[in-house]
Image: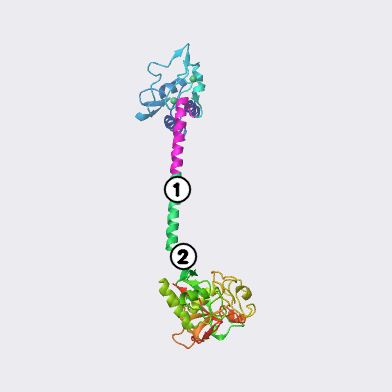
């Protein structure tokens, strides 16, 4: 009498041979396992032979059984009649393969679990799939088709994701202000501007800087609340000529900074270029100027930190201005912030202004007699070219070491 374990083995064998469906196998296995569980009782009286298993599993009653274990099958799972009506061709006790007619011993034949063709010879039975050649081929084809559809769906999904990503990136770029822009001064003359981000910085000088004068103190935190554009160079003579129709400079050269311009000339230039371009153009506030000059640096000079690399001053200029953009830029792409020409700022100059200045976007004192100059010139000592250095000058004075650069919103 077979034990439940032996019955399980037999079931497994039937499944491998394709004689029972996986569904029936699972149901019978569950029943058998229930029998061997502690408390489930002995599988007493279970006696089974090949023919019983085969016969019972393939009857038409809608039930399958192993020994005294009965499994009720749902209608769709009912096995096909066995032997089939009319029977398989049979000669001399041997079974003929339905695909090639070769005659085989019963133990050497197989059954397709898909189409239920029985008595298949080994050549027409695919063991791994437990199917006949036909069904295995169909299965492989439908598997390939499924894979192809999955691949296609995956590719479409990726393409859609990529398209959305690009669309988002373009929308983001369109919403962002351009990093650089060019103003048209007329007569084919352009003026390059670079975007200066909003942010905070420490304005003025700490006590540790021996060159710092009292009006650079206290060292205080200032926030520039809005991004703005700033000319990457001081206004050149070509640009001034194109906008104003004249060139007052002492050191002539189209690419050299314009000089001999007083504060009122600089403001007039901004107003005229604003009218020409439809963009509001100004002189920078003193805070904007120092913030842009430092470009995140905290030392004495911005960029490389060395005045001789960053600008033209008394020690390297040869006593004159130089074409703009020949020295190193600072971290935000601004040239000639140190030296070449002093640059007018919008603010009134207040020696003690830092003690009372606003934290956000300081605009300078409300009144005064001098306007702010920043950055030093071709004739300056290095200390006058420092990022924090401040000077005030009569707004009506013209001198060949003073020019300016512009900002716009
Ligand atoms: Zn065959
Ligand atoms: Zn088949």
Q: Indicate the quadrant of ligand 2 in the picture.
A: top left
Taken as a whole, is the magenta stretch helix, strand or loop?
A: helix
Q: Secondary structure at mark 2?
A: loop
- Magenta region includes residue 145: yes
- Compare marks 1 and 2 and give the one earlier in the sequence: 1
Viewer-nearest residue: 304 or 40: 304
Dividing the image into 4 quarters, which one contains the C terminus?
A: bottom left
Q: Which class describes the residues within 10 Å of circle 2: few (<14), some (14-19), or many (20+)?
A: few
- Magenta region includes residue 152: yes
Viewer-nearest residue: 170 or 144: 170
Per the rendered image, the range of residues in magenta is 129-154
Disc 2 designates what residue? Answer: 178
Q: Is residue 43 visible?
A: no
Q: Which class describes the residues within 10 Å of circle 1: few (<14), some (14-19), or many (20+)?
A: few
Q: Position of residue 403 (x, y in %)?
A: 53, 79
Disc 1 designates what residue? Answer: 159
- Residue found 44% across the figure and 60% down from its top: 172
Q: Secondary structure at mark 1?
A: helix
């Amino acid at each position: 009498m077979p034990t439940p374990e032996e019955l399980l083995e037999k079931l497994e064998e039937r499944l491998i041979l394709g004689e029972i469906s996986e569904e029936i196998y699972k149901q019978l296995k569950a029943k058998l396992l229930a029998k061997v569980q502690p408390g489930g009782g002995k599988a007493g009286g279970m006696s089974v032979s090949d023919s019983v298993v085969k016969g019972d599993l393939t009857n038409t009653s809608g039930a399958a059984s192993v020994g005294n274990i009965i499994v009720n099958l749902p209608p769709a799972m009912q096995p096909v009649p066995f032997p089939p009506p009319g029977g398989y061709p049979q000669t001399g006790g041997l079974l003929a393969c339905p695909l090639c007619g070769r005659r085989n011993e019963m133990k050497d034949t197989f059954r397709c679990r898909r189409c239920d063709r029985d008595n298949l010879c080994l050549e027409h039975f695919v063991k791994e799939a437990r199917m006949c050649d036909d069904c295995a081929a169909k299965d492989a084809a439908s598997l390939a088709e499924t894979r192809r559809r999955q691949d296609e769906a995956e590719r479409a999904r990726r393409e859609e994701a990529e398209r959305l990503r690009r669309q988002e990136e373009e929308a983001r770029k369109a919403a962002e202000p351009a990093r650089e822009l060019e103003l048209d001064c007329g007569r084919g003359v352009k003026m390059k501007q670079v975007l200066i981000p909003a942010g905070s910085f420490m304005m003025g000088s700490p006590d540790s800087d021996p060159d710092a004068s009292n009006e650079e103190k206290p060292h205080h935190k200032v926030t520039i609340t809005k991004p703005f554009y700033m000319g990457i160079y001081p206004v050149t003579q070509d640009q001034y000529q194109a906008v104003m129709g004249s060139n007052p400079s002492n050191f002539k050269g189209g690419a050299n900074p314009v000089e001999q311009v007083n504060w009122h000339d600089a403001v007039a230039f901004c107003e005229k270029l604003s009218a020409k371009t439809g963009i509001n153009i100004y002189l920078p506030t003193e805070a904007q100027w120092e913030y842009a000059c430092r470009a995140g640096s905290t030392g004495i000079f911005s960029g490389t930190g060395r005045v001789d690399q960053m600008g033209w001053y008394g020690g390297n200029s040869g006593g004159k201005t130089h074409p703009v953009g020949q020295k190193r830029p600072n971290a935000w792409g601004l040239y000639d912030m140190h030296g070449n020409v002093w640059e007018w700022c919008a603010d009134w100059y207040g020696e003690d202004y830092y003690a009372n200045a606003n934290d956000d976007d300081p605009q300078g004192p409300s009144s005064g007699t001098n306007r702010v100059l920043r950055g030093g010139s071709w004739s300056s000592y290095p200390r006058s070219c420092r990022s924090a250095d401040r000077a005030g000058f009569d707004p009506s004075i013209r001198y060949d070491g003073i020019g300016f650069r512009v900002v716009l919103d």
